[in-house]
Image (spheres, rainbow, N blue to C red):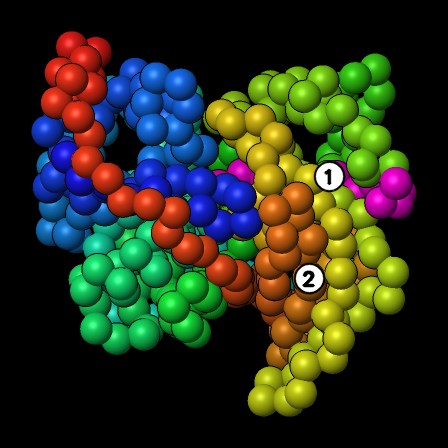
């Protein structure tokens, strides 16, 4: 079985092609492969297949999904109405139709060149990963699955499209985010709420970008760095408010102002900048998370009242433990994510490990 290991800002994944797998994917096998002592070691597993292989690919992952999120293939809906009213936006009511559905995630009308499945190291499945998606997209381009620099792939959150910038960088149209979803049932249309952990209440904003994000603003970068995410993260991730668990991001604004707007076709102003730390569902604190960065960026832009004109696109530099990502968001919460990813090494599993994996159910 051949594989490649990639990383993006320190967030590392194993990439395998489904036709290379000598066994079905189960939660226990994913966990062993991702174990840094017993397996190859990674923050997750990316499985690529042809779009027409979707049904058989799903069947091979049945064991992992049974122990993972019940959210698989869910289509979520959201609106900005309440949140924009809270910011005094007179257009807020008109944008209540800015809901994201599965169809709304289409980057373009292209037929997808591949299907991407994402698994966390605990064996659960993830609908989407910004870092994982970039690694998969760049892998597909390098490995000749597609000859063009612009193409679309299918994920459990819907279709996403890529623009390859260079050998290690791509800009991904992640689709439209929403502030309500089945991952936060009964939540307010603004996504705003409060959750208890570590002896205190945390004000948060729920953002769904194919997977659930719980974004929490912190007063300043110094306070952010002092947080013990290992102590406070699990209770929020597993809160009963989030039946499928949630990813959590804590963020703080950095110096240099809040504005980061770009008019269509116009020059980009200096983007706003925030520092974020991510507690990833099924992983724990991680050096980087693309969707976590998106959740934090959207919460920041909404909190500062900038998302008021759908014709404008706002850019936010998100500084993470492993590096920097650029998030672009318009007033309808349509999102682009730009960042790098690169291969670490390629290899082949030993026959001994394959035998052990086959014995692991």
Secondary element type, mark 1: strand
The one of 116 and 72 positioned closer to us in this rendering: 116
> Which of the 4 quarters of the picture holds residue 284?
top right
Seen at 40% across and 18% down, the residue is 37
Seen in the image, is 8 located left or right of residue 235? Answer: left
Q: Which residues are magenta?
A: 211-222
Q: Nearer the viewer, mark 2 or mark 1?
A: 2
Q: Position of residue 258 (x, y in %)?
A: 82, 65
Residue shown at the point (38%, 47%) measured from the top left: 344
Comparing 26 with 264, the one in front is 26
220 is within the stretch colored magenta: yes
Q: Residues within 10 Å of mark 2 (few under 14, many from 20)?
A: many
Above or below, 135 relative to 46:
below
Q: Residues within 10 Å of mark 1 (few under 14, many from 20)?
A: many
The residue at which mark 2 appears reads as 317
Q: Residue at x 16, y 10 (%)?
A: 359
Query: Residue 103: x, y in percent?
Result: 35, 58
Residue 179 horizontal side relative to residue 149, left or right: right
Place of residue 122 in the rendered image (x, y in percent of width and height, measured from the top left) = 41, 21
Q: Return the mark for residue 250.
A: 1
Percent of width and height locating residue 92:
71, 63
- Name the side, left or right, on which 140 lies relative to 358: right
């Amino acid at each position: 079985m051949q594989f490649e290991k990639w990383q993006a800002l320190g967030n590392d994944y194993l990439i395998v092609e489904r036709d290379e797998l000598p066994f079905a994917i189960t939660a226990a096998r994913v966990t062993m492969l991702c174990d840094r002592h017993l397996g190859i070691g990674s923050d997750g597993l990316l499985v690529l297949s042809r779009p027409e292989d979707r049904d058989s690919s799903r069947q091979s992952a049945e064991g992992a999904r049974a122990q993972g999120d019940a959210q698989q293939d869910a289509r979520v809906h959201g609106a900005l109405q309440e949140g924009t009213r809270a910011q005094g936006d007179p257009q807020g009511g008109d944008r209540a139709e800015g809901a994201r559905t599965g169809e709304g995630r289409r980057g373009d009308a292209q037929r997808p060149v591949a299907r991407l499945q994402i698994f966390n190291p605990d064996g659960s499945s993830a609908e989407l990963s910004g870092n994982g998606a970039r690694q998969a997209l760049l892998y597909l381009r390098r490995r000749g699955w597609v000859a063009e620099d612009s193409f679309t792939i299918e994920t459990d959150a819907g279709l996403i499209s890529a623009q390859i910038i260079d050998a290690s960088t791509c800009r991904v149209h992640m689709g439209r985010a929403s502030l309500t979803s089945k991952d936060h049932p009964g939540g307010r249309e603004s996504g705003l709420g409060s959750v208890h952990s570590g002896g205190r209440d945390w004000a948060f904003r729920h953002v769904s970008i194919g997977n659930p994000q719980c974004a929490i603003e912190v007063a300043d970068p110094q306070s952010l760095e002092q947080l013990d995410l290992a102590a406070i993260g699990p209770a929020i991730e597993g809160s009963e408010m989030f039946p499928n668990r949630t990813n959590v991001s804590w963020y703080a604004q950095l110096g240099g102002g809040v504005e980061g707007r770009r008019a269509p076709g116009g020059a980009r102003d200096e983007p706003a900048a925030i520092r974020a730390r991510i507690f990833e569902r099924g992983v724990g604190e991680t050096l980087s998370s693309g969707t976590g960065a998106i959740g934090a960026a959207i919460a920041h832009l909404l909190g500062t009242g900038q998302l008021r004109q759908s014709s404008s696109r706002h850019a936010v530099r998100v500084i993470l433990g492993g590096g920097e990502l650029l998030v672009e968001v318009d007033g309808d919460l349509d999102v682009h994510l730009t960042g790098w990813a690169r291969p670490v090494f390629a290899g082949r599993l030993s026959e001994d490990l394959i035998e052990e994996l086959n014995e692991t159910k």
